[in-house]
Image: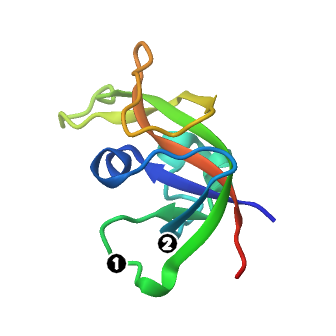
């Protein structure tokens, strides 16, 4: 059985260590709802996300889980101020997300033209025992 885990870009930049397929990592995991990341990754991909990784507490020690990384995708998205908005807050542009399979998740990621790095989607297998 595999699970999909979301790791925010700021989590990696702040506290993350690089990792790749085949490695076992221990993370604090919090269950993710289907709508939690839909604005960035789209509804279909958001429904695949089982957990989000939490570096800053709030998950409780019991939520630390060991998982073996199976695959890693960088997530890059375009942000804009929505047309007609009275706010200067940029929002993810629907359908403007790119998923890039990579061999290793790194703390710093090269930006893609016109897009911003948002985080990683990690496919992993729970480690028992």
Q: Quadrant of residue 61?
A: bottom left
Q: Position of residue 67 (x, y in %)?
A: 64, 65
Q: Position of residue 62 (x, y in %)?
A: 49, 87
Q: Which residue is mark 2?
A: 30
Identity of the residue drawn at 63% across and 53% down = 23
Q: Which residue is mark 1?
A: 58
Identity of the residue drawn at 44% across and 18% down = 112
* Frontmost residue, 21 versus 31: 21
- Label 1, secondary structure: give it: loop
Residue 64 vertical placement versus 38 (above, below): below
- Label 2, secondary structure: give it: strand
- Say if mark 2 contacts mark 1, CB within 8 Å: yes
Q: Quadrant of residue 48?
A: bottom right
Q: Quadrant of residue 82?
A: top left
Identity of the residue drawn at 41% across and 78% down = 59
Q: Is residue 38 left or right of residue 126?
A: left
* Frontmost residue, 128 versus 60: 128
Residue 35 vertical placement versus 101 (above, below): below
Instruction: Looking at the image, tell me whether mark 2 or mark 1 is earlier in sequence order.
Output: 2
* Frontmost residue, 112 versus 78: 112
**Where the C terminus falls, by quadrant?**
bottom right
């Amino acid at each position: 059985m595999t699970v999909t885990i979301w790791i925010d870009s700021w989590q990696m930049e702040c506290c993350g260590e690089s990792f790749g397929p085949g490695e076992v990592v221990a993370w604090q995991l919090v269950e993710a709802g289907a709508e939690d990341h839909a604005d960035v990754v789209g509804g279909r991909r958001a429904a695949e996300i089982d957990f989000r990784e939490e570096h800053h507490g709030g998950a409780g020690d019991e939520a630390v889980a060991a998982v073996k990384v199976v695959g890693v995708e960088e997530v890059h998205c375009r942000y804009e101020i929505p047309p007609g908005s009275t706010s200067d807050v940029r929002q993810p542009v629907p359908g403007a997300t790119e998923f890039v399979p990579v061999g290793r998740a790194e703390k710093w990621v090269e930006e893609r033209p016109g897009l911003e790095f948002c985080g990683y989607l990690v496919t992993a297998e729970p480690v028992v025992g």
